[in-house]
DNA sequence: TAGTGGTCTAGACCACGTG
DNA sequence: ACGTGGTCTAGACCACTAC
């Protein structure tokens, strides 16, 4: 049964196919880790040529929403450890090789959105949120304290236990328990003096310069999901980004 | 006269075409700002189909080495102000909109590579370098002091005057005067206490937390060109990066 | 009107993974 | 052997720019 994605909107045909696929992803019709139909099959379904269908998928693969594997098929990307380590975790040792951090929970609170959280998450001031604090260690040293804020309305029935017992990453939890996939983040960095509270957790003296990373995470519909403020001790580690 | 880029190497045909084009770019056969031959023309030259030729160009356009303009043609990218502001300058006001910094020269010295410079530029310790220091201001406030190190061997006869009188950016100078095009950078960020020297230039007190950005710039052959250490006052500005 | 890049077709054959 | 994605062809027509 052919599906019509023609230019009811005016744009190119392959963009229509792309939107149709994205819709299936956003609704959870196609789930992370799942194999999508073959290109020939999809081309028939949408009544487009194989070339056009491939062009639609090309951009989704570039954005790491789909993953092609020759001989096997095309998968919906999922938040496995390596993927997250590679794309979303930017703290590396000043000397040595990147590794995965040990995460320990400090607390799990209900709270209300302050100005910064409300602005970044695009919700009203005072909206109920979860405020989670984690400690991240590399090679035995605490290098970062993460303060995570998420809208309670988007994460109903989330419990401290889910946060503490999860075997995988937090983005993995968002994806598996709530169907929310983080596809993009933006990060704002500043140098600030460590607060007494953070200094204690980082085992440094208050006032020592620390790097703060304000990261807003966005889902497939480009709506903000999470604000995470990481307070990083850059005595032996640093933030690394490759541009272009 | 058709040119042969066939599988003497084994890889896909479009990769061969891509390498042939890259070679013309790296040698300066095709210069920044210049219009390259049309796709139909190139397809004929290299004896490939238009689809294959387009695929070769697609990746170069993604890497911002070429720029397509429908109706006009395909250009070699050049380091104009907007391009650099957009891709390589990451300091933005905490509140307000991104703008171009005012650059003032502090000094222009000959020096010798220390351990850090030698490591990053992949040259021997003590190699003669230029060490340039600039002040960057946004909206009247000094926000960054940039310490730039480049290998004297790669920039022969570079003068202080060239640095001070240039109407454009430094990368533009590299490109126009030395044929070196920066296509990629990596950046490492730390929070550190401001040195007396830097504090004075930034008009803050020594020891105040400042953000340091160690940026290594690479050319089209992926060889390091420049190490730039930016010391940034993040009282009213911040570093911004979009991930993915 | 002529030339450019942008989209689209309807195939063919190759390289890879799995049973 | 079969099905998958990867490459490649040889066109056609559209949208945009410039003259």
Image (spheres, coloured by chain):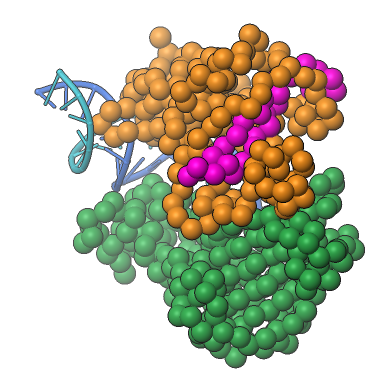
Chain colours: A orange, B green, C cyan, D blue
Q: Nearer the viewer, residue A50 or A193?
A: A193
Who's the residue at 34% across and 55% down the image? B15
Q: Is residue B52 positioned above or below B116 on the image?
A: above
Q: Nearer the viewer, residue D6 or A148?
A: A148
Who's the residue at 58% across and 70% down the image? B227
Viewport quadrant of the N terminus of chain A? top left
Count every numbered label the image shows and give the total.
Answer: 0
Q: Is residue A101 positioned above or below B126 on the image?
A: above
Q: Nearer the viewer, residue C12 or A86?
A: A86
Residue B34, percent across and down? 56, 68
Quadrant of res A213: top right
- The extreme bottom residue here reads B157
Who's the residue at 77% across and 26% down the image? A122
Q: Is residue B94 magenta?
A: no
Viewport quadrant of the C terminus of chain A? bottom right
Tell whether C2 sits left or right of B234.
Answer: left
Q: Nearer the viewer, residue B168 or B150?
A: B150
Residue B75, percent across and down? 56, 62
Tell whether A130 sits left or right of A30.
Answer: right
Q: Is residue A126 magenta?
A: yes
From the image, give the main secondary structure of the stretch colored magenta: strand
Residue A70, percent across and down? 29, 34
Residue B28, percent across and down? 48, 75
Give the magenta range: A123-149
Let me know if residue A46 appears in the view.
Answer: yes
- The extreme right residue here reads B140
Who's the residue at 62% across and 31% down the image? A134
Quadrant of res B194: bottom right
Let me know if residue A214 appears in the view.
Answer: no
């Amino acid at each position: 049964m052919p599906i019509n994605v023609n230019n009811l909107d005016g744009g190119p045909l392959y963009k229509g196919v792309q939107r149709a696929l994205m819709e299936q992803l956003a609704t959870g019709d196609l789930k992370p880790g799942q194999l999508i139909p073959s290109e020939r099959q999809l081309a028939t379904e949408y009544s487009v040529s194989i070339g056009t269908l491939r062009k639609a998928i090309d951009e989704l693969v570039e954005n790491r929403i789909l993953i092609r594997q020759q001989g096997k098929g095309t998968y919906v990307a999922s938040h496995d450890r390596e993927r997250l380590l590679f794309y979303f975790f930017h703290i590396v040792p000043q000397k040595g090789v990147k590794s995965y951090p040990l995460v320990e929970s400090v607390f799990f609170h209900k709270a209300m959105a302050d100005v910064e959280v409300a602005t970044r998450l695009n919700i009203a001031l005072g909206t109920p949120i979860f405020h989670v604090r984690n400690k991240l260690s590399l090679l035995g040293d605490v290098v970062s304290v993460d303060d995570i804020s998420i809208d309670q309305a988007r994460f109903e029935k989330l419990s401290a236990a889910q946060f503490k017992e999860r075997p995988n990453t937090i983005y993995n939890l968002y994806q598996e328990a709530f169907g929310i996939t983080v596809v993009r983040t933006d990060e704002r960095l500043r140098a600030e003096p460590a607060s007494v509270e953070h200094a204690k957790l980082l085992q440094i003296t208050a006032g020592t310069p620390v790097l703060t990373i304000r990261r807003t995470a966005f889902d497939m519909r480009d709506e903000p999901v999470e604000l995470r403020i990481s307070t990083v001790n850059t005595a032996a580690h640093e933030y690394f980004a490759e541009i272009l």
